[in-house]
């Protein structure tokens, strides 16, 4: 990990949460955890986090502006908005892995689903 990644992670994890409303306070630890993972994955993202005009409080406030519908927002959309606050050109890909144990095996079978696949499974378009 580079110094900029370490600094960006510190900036996120040590950020004060002053002036946040209840929804923003609720989202804060989840957004921090995910943005830390983004910083670990990408030095470019970490550099964007380190910009002087970018803060965790600014991110949370931008995500929860009136009319953004945060009461009905998926986790995926929350993390995409957070990523795009710090790095507007960023996009977020989502995948889940489900470990299903088999009766005759001690190891589990891994099912790999992409976020988009979940919508297709229900007959969605």
Image: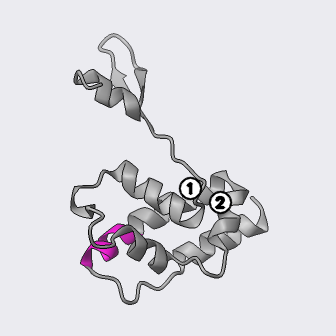
Please name the residue shown 53% across and 59% down the image: 84
Secondary structure category for the residue under label 1: helix
On the image, the x and y values in percent for residue 29 come to 40, 68
Please name the residue shown 43% across and 23% down the image: 110
Vertical placement of 72 versus 110: above or below? below
- Residues in magenta? 22-28
- Residue 34 forms part of the magenta stretch: no
**In the foreground, 20 or 29:** 20
Q: Main secondary structure of the magenta part?
A: helix
**In the foreground, 107 or 75:** 75
Residue most extreme to the right? 2
In this picture, residue 44 sits left or right of residue 97: right
Residue 45, disc: 2
On the image, the x and y values in percent for residue 25 come to 33, 76
Please name the residue shown 67% across and 64% down the image: 46
Q: Which residue is mark 1?
A: 37
**In the foreground, 37 or 63:** 63
**In the foreground, 89 or 99:** 89
Mark in the foreground, 2 or 1: 2
Q: Residues within 10 Å of mark 1 (few under 14, many from 20)?
A: few
Whichever of callouts 2 and 1 sits on the residue coming sooner in the sequence is: 1
Where on the picture, by quarter, is residue 62? bottom left
On the image, the x and y values in percent for residue 76 come to 39, 49
Where on the picture, by quarter, is residue 14? bottom right
In this picture, residue 32 sits left or right of residue 64: right
Q: How many discs appear?
A: 2
Q: Residues within 10 Å of mark 2 (few under 14, many from 20)?
A: many
Residue most extreme to the top? 104
Which of the image's four quarters has the N terminus? bottom right
Secondary structure category for the residue under label 2: helix
């Amino acid at each position: 990990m580079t110094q900029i990644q370490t600094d960006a992670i510190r900036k996120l994890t040590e950020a004060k949460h002053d002036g946040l409303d209840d929804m923003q306070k609720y989202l804060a630890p989840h957004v921090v955890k995910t943005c830390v993972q983004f910083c670990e994955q990408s030095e470019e993202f970490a550099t964007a986090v380190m910009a002087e005009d970018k803060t965790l409080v600014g991110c949370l406030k931008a995500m929860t502006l009136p009319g953004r519908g945060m009461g009905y927002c998926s986790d995926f959309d929350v993390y995409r908005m957070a990523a795009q606050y710090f790095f507007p050109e960023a996009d977020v890909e989502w995948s889940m892995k489900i470990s299903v144990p088999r009766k005759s095996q001690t190891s589990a079978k891994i099912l790999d689903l992409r976020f988009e696949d979940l919508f297709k499974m229900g007959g969605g378009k």
